Amino acid sequence: MSLSETEKLRVLLPHWIEHNREHAAEFREWRERIGQSGGEGIAAQLESATQSLEEACKALSLALEKLGGPPGTHSLVHN
């Protein structure tokens, strides 16, 4: 039995969300490590990248919710 595109997306979205969260944590760690000594606004750029990934996670989470959540779960949200 092959998965539909929607079923595949329900599998992929949690992975993408977790992957983005891991990167955001790495960016945050590096921002703290470099602090203000990074010059040229590097810390600010890392913060901006972190915020962008957090926004992406929110959007991906909403998409997953609209699809009924990850496989094996039931969501109260109905399309």
Image (cartoon, grey):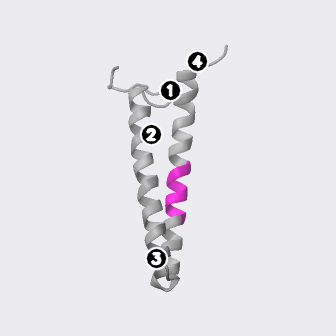
Mark 1–mark 3 contact, CB under 8 Å? no
Q: Earlier in the sequence, mark 2 or mark 4?
A: 4
Residue corresponding to mark 4: 4
Which residue lies under the disc numbered 1? 72
SS at mark 1 in the image: loop
Mark 3 belongs to which amino acid? Gly
Q: CA distance from mark 2 to mark 4?
A: 19 Å
The amino acid pointed to by label 2 is Leu
Residue furthest front as drawn: 40
As measured in the structure, the alpha-carbon distance from the residue carrying label 1 to the one carrying label 3 is 44 Å
Judge from the rendering whether residue 72 lies leftward or rightward of residue 79; answer left or right.
Answer: right
Q: Secondary structure at mark 3?
A: loop
Mark 3 or mark 2: which comes first in sequence?
3
Task: State the CA–CA distance, disc 2 to disc 1.
Answer: 18 Å
Write the start and end of the magenta stretch as one range. 19-26
The quarter of the image holding the C terminus is top left
Q: Given the image, on which type of amino acid does mark 4 rest? A: Ser
Mark before the other along the chain sequence, 4 or 3? 4
Reply above or below: 39 against 2: below
Mark identifier at residue 41: 3
Camera-near label (1 vs 3) is: 3
- Which of the two marks, 1 or 4, is nearer to us in this view? 4
Q: Rounded to the nearest whole Å, what is the CA distance between mark 1 and mark 4?
A: 15 Å
Which residue corresponds to the image point at 49% horizontal and 79% vertical from the top-left?
40
**Residue 17, horizontal then vertical, whole percent:** 50, 45
Q: Is residue 62 left or right of residue 49?
A: left
Secondary structure, mark 2, is helix
Which residue: 51% across, 27% down? 71
Quick one: quadrant of the N terminus? Answer: top right
Q: Which mark is residue 60?
A: 2
